[in-house]
Amino acid sequence: MSITKPVALRQTSSRQARYLTLEGVLYGVLLVGFLGLTLLPLLAVIQGSFESQIEGAQAFTLQGWQALFNEPRILTALGNTLGLTLTSQLIALPVSIGLAWLLGRTDLPGRGWLEFAFWVSFFLPALAVVQGWTLVLDPNNGLLNRWLMQTFGLSQAPLDIYSWGGIVFAHLATTTVSAKVMMLTPAFKSMDARYEEAALVAGDSRFKALCMVTLPLLKPALIVTAIMGVIRGLESFEIELVLGAPKRIDVYSTLIYDLTRYDPINFASAFALGILIVAIMGLLAIASRRSTRQGHHVTVSGQAKTAVMSLGKWRWPLGILVGLFALLLTVVPLAFLVTSSLMRRFGFFNLDKVWTLKHWYSVVGDPIFMDSVINTLTIASGSAAFAATLSLVVAYTIVRSRRAGRALLEFAAWIPFSIPGVLASLAMLWLILHSGIDWLYGSTLSLVLTVGLASVTLGVQLIRSQLLQVNRELEEAAWISGASAWKTVLSIVIPLCARSIVVVAVMAFVTAARDISHLALLVSSENRPLSMLQLEYIAEGRNEASAVIGVIIALIAICAALIARRLGYRPETRQV
Amino acid sequence: MLEIRHIVKSFEGNRVLDDLSLDIRQGEIFTLLGASGCGKTTLLRILAGLETPDEGRLYFHGQPWVDTSADTFLPPQKRGVGLVFQSYAVWPHLNVFDNVAYPLRNQKVPRAQIREKVLGILESVGLGGYEQRATHQLSGGQQQRVAMARALVGDPALLLLDEPFSNLDIGLRKQLRHELKDLQKRLGLTVVLVTHDQDDAFALSDRIAVLRAGRVEQIGSAEDIHDQPATSFVQQFVGRGTRLEGRLAGSGDRAWLSSAVVKLAEPLQHAVDSPLTLWVRPDTVALQPDGSQAGTGVRAQVSHSIFAGDRYETYVQLEDGQQLMAYQPRNHCSAPGTWVDVIFSSNPHASLLATQVSS
């Protein structure tokens, strides 16, 4: 019989000493570091709102807050923010429910492909899509406007994308509908069909079954989707920046941008305005969490029967309708974007030479372009690595640690989600300016930290839900086999969660690659990425050049969408 | 070789192990038998080092693994034990070979030796030729063998098994029990087995400890525990049986049952006429045709019989209405309605009804 040598006695560790181990110290560093990273921007916002704008004056003042309630411009912006968000959400929600039901529960033709189209739309950068639509709906030379004017002999352009209605349309055409469809379709798919069948057997019509049985069952998923939609709507920045500018339709995010860039500069009011929005979003985030917790996941029972409903004679008409809708979200705006990048001057089909590669040559040939590509790749890869690593560490600690304070980590992980991009950008700028760490000002690192942190909330939730499915005994088996806690994480935990880690990295990559709001106030001419370059070209009126950039960013986003899809990521409501 | 002394463990105020002490001997299969929640798995996890007891000591070959008074705790990595989890915990991202080789790689064993040892142990658990299989291609029984091979490959001084057969169907269970017993003899293993299944315990164990609410009720061989239960709990928990109500008679060595007096296995020191419970195993009861000479005076009427393959399980009703079950051989089945004499081939154990004190 072979027996291992009895182990030496000195290897036994003392109980008290266990709190002073390397692990204990690292845990402390993680807790303090993560809380700092997430809470400091929030604290900076609060502190900043009370700071005087005149240097040397008293440190604490309520001027910033007073301006908030006195200046009509700020009140109008708040009103616009709420009005635009609610309008676009109220339109998008019923449309999305219908689409998700058709995709998830019926025999709609080509539903796999259609779902994929919404998936791609969910990834597409808003600015590129908006620009694509601008080329169609611009009041001066938009294609549709000109066609309508010619056909019906109108003297004025009937459609104007630079308007309140245009902004709502842009929201619907970008991610507002597609994000909801992406979240709701899996919920409809996994719902147990027996409940619906019972209602049909009991004599309800199909529509009645949908309203009386299906929707109430999916209530938790619907509530979360609606709340997430409102939060995303409140965050919106670049659509309003581009479409609201001509008629000065401000929302709070563009106003913050203005208040901190153009005279009279007023940081305090910008911060105060931000706090209001953070408070609203924080409450919504809490509400969303509560409703996911209370949701008695009736829809995903073990023996759920997932049958599809036959649409009968409506099958093809509805299929074509949904197909057209999917095209409007993806192919149509991109096609116009590509067309415009290839035209000498967009919309002028009567020139001698209509088509040209000139814009591609001039944009790609400009040294700024290559620099921007490198900057985008650096920022996106950096933020992907940062978000994936931090999410993994935080999620693992939340799930496995028995130490005190992990509830704090769980709470802190939700903070980045509740801070709109522009405000995060401003807070980070404020922190850098006040901390005296000059080298961080305008540095690529500051961009990576800010935009990477934005992906941490989703990252922690995703990795956490996968970790919860990893049986703890798989780790214990490694310990018994002699592997240290560190080696167990590296050789067992990370490989088992590889999928969700890669998905988090891909999501963070594409978020960073198309981001504008988090970078807007931090970027310098040295580290300007493609997305900011596109915004600049738009501001300069170089529509064809910005279309070129838009096409490139869209391609990056589509690649990321394909990779994430390949890995089987489904944005389910319980993950967020 | 493994001394377990005064172990106390609570989870959120619930005392799971209550001052528990045991000795496990070299080369035996020692079984912790109990219902769920009795603390048996917690004890196994304490032996593995996956839980720390609140109080108590654990010595292995005289070397301290745990000693709360001296603040000593040896982490699981250093104990050199093998553990087969109830879920098997076979790593899904590694193939069979890499699963089994994992402990050896942690011990920094040379490559060639790892290969030799892994292939050898796979052969002995009956998985020769499976080394390149992905684990999701394996059946439940094969995964169990992988877990066993991984636990054994590092030549553990102690093998811990947590409900190793509970997820398998009956036929496979019997086969794997045989194989485990065989392997244990061949390798001279010391095994601690946790189970709620008496058949597992009886088929494998050299000694069994019956656990209840974090305490040891009885330690002994399978036969001891089945035939001479130390407490009424063991009596009820182990084997099958019927509970009958009676009253103490004679000088405490007999009991009134129905309208007759029967002799008890052990006398009870209590006032005559105290109500008591008799525990009767079906294999100790014989049903004789009415009026035979060896009768105890306990008469019963057959209500029905259930066919159980190699025998009948016959249910009878005593004169006072209490029901009793007895085994009957296939050629001696009494027809429903017939009157029979109830004979006890070994005298029944009894406990006082009011206090349920052990007999």
Image (spheres, rainbow, N blue to C red):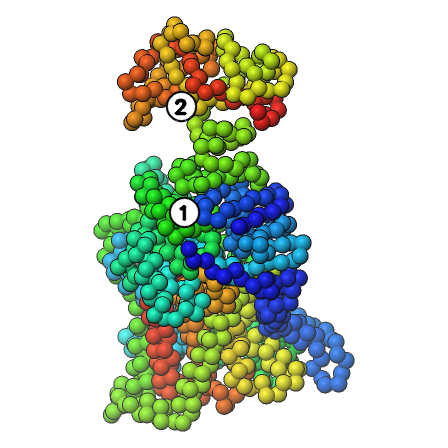
Asked if one can make out residue A286 in the rendered structure from this viewpoint, the answer is yes
Residue at numbered disc 1 = B164
Cα–Cα gap, marks 2 and 1 = 29 Å
Amino acid at pointer 1: Pro
Evaluate whether label 2 is on the same chain as label 1: yes
Q: Residues within 10 Å of mark 1 (few under 14, many from 20)?
A: many
Q: Earlier in the sequence, mark 2 or mark 1?
A: 1
Residue at numbered disc 2 = B283
Mark 1, chain letter?
B
Identify whether B259 is placed above or below A519: above
Which residue ends up furthest to the top in the rendered image?
A: B291
Identify whether A195 is placed above or below A1: above
Foreground: disc 2 or disc 1 = 2
A412 horizontally vs A66: left or right: left
Determine the residue positioned at 69% across, 72% down: A66
Front residue of B110 and B188: B188
Identify whether A213 is placed above or below A463: above
Front residue of B127 and B41: B127
Which residue ends up furthest to the right in the rendered image?
A: A58
Q: Residue A347, percent across and down?
A: 31, 83
Determine the residue positioned at 30% across, 53% down: B126
Q: Residue A417, percent across and down?
A: 53, 67
Mark 2, chain letter?
B
Q: Residues within 10 Å of mark 2 (few under 14, many from 20)?
A: some
Secondary structure, mark 2, is: helix
Determine the residue positioned at 34% across, 19% down: B328
Which residue ends up furthest to the front in the rendered image?
A: A1
Amino acid at pointer 2: Asp
**Quarter residue A63 falls in:** bottom right
Identify whether A311 is placed above or below A485: above
